[in-house]
């Protein structure tokens, strides 16, 4: 008898496992165990690749894309806010990630203009 694989169910479970692993990574990073945190991030990413599941949105920016360290501001990451962008530096390997937020700035400006 052939065992049927249910893709939708597999992917849903994969997503749940990834969330669990990222939570574990966060708690280990908080306990100053960067090695364990990195391992959990790696496992979560591997599950994501295996089942073609994206990294859950809340954790998308929470790890270093280069060395997979869990990025915790002030613990394992430096966060700076610049002109229209957020710059996150991984303190483990020094990799820099930039996230734009010009859209948020534009909407704020648009809501301010009617009074002028
Ligand atoms: Zn890094």
Image (cartoon, rainbow, N blue to C red):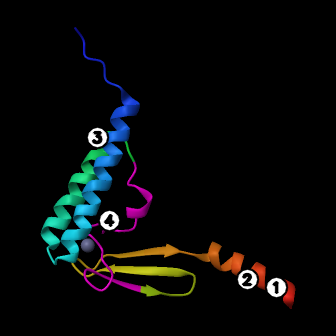
Find the distance from the CA under tag 2 to the CA under tag 1.
Answer: 6 Å
Q: Is the magenta stretch mostly helix, strand or loop?
A: loop
Q: Are marks 3 and 2 in contact (CB under 8 Å)?
A: no
Taking the image in four quarters, ligand 1 sits in the one at bottom left
Disc 4, ligand 1: is the CB inside 8 Å?
yes
Residue 16 inside the magenta-drawn segment = no
Question: For mark 4, does the 10 Å Cα neighbourhood hold few (<14), some (14 to 19), or many (20 or more) residues?
Answer: some
Can see residue 68? no
**Nearer-N-terminus badge (3/1):** 3
Find the distance from the CA under tag 3 to the CA under tag 4.
Answer: 18 Å
Residue 87: name its quadrant: bottom left
For disc 1, the marked residue is 113
Regarding mark 3 in the picture, which secondary structure is present there?
helix
The numbered dot on residue 65 is: 4
Q: Nearer the viewer, mark 3 or mark 1?
A: 1
Q: Are marks 2 and 1 in contact (CB under 8 Å)?
A: yes
**Nearer-N-terminus badge (3/4):** 3
Find the distance from the CA under tag 4 to the CA under tag 1.
Answer: 38 Å
| Rendered location of residue 75, percent (x, y) | 25, 83
Regarding mark 1 in the picture, which secondary structure is present there?
helix
Regarding mark 2 in the picture, which secondary structure is present there?
helix
Residue 74 inside the magenta-drawn segment = yes
For disc 2, the marked residue is 109
- At 30% from the left and 51% from the top, the residue drawn is 18
């Amino acid at each position: 008898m052939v065992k049927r694989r249910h893709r939708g169910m597999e992917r849903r479970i994969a997503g749940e496992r990834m969330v669990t692993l990222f939570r574990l990574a966060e708690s280990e990073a908080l306990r100053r165990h960067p090695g364990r945190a990195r391992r959990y991030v790696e496992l979560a990413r591997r599950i994501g690749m295996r089942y073609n599941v994206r990294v859950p949105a809340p954790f998308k920016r929470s790890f270093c894309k280069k060395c997979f360290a869990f990025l915790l501001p002030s613990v394992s990451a430096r966060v700076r806010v610049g002109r229209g962008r957020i710059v996150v530096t991984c303190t483990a390997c020094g990799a820099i990630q930039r996230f734009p937020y010009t859209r948020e700035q534009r909407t704020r400006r648009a809501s301010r203009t009617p009074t002028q």
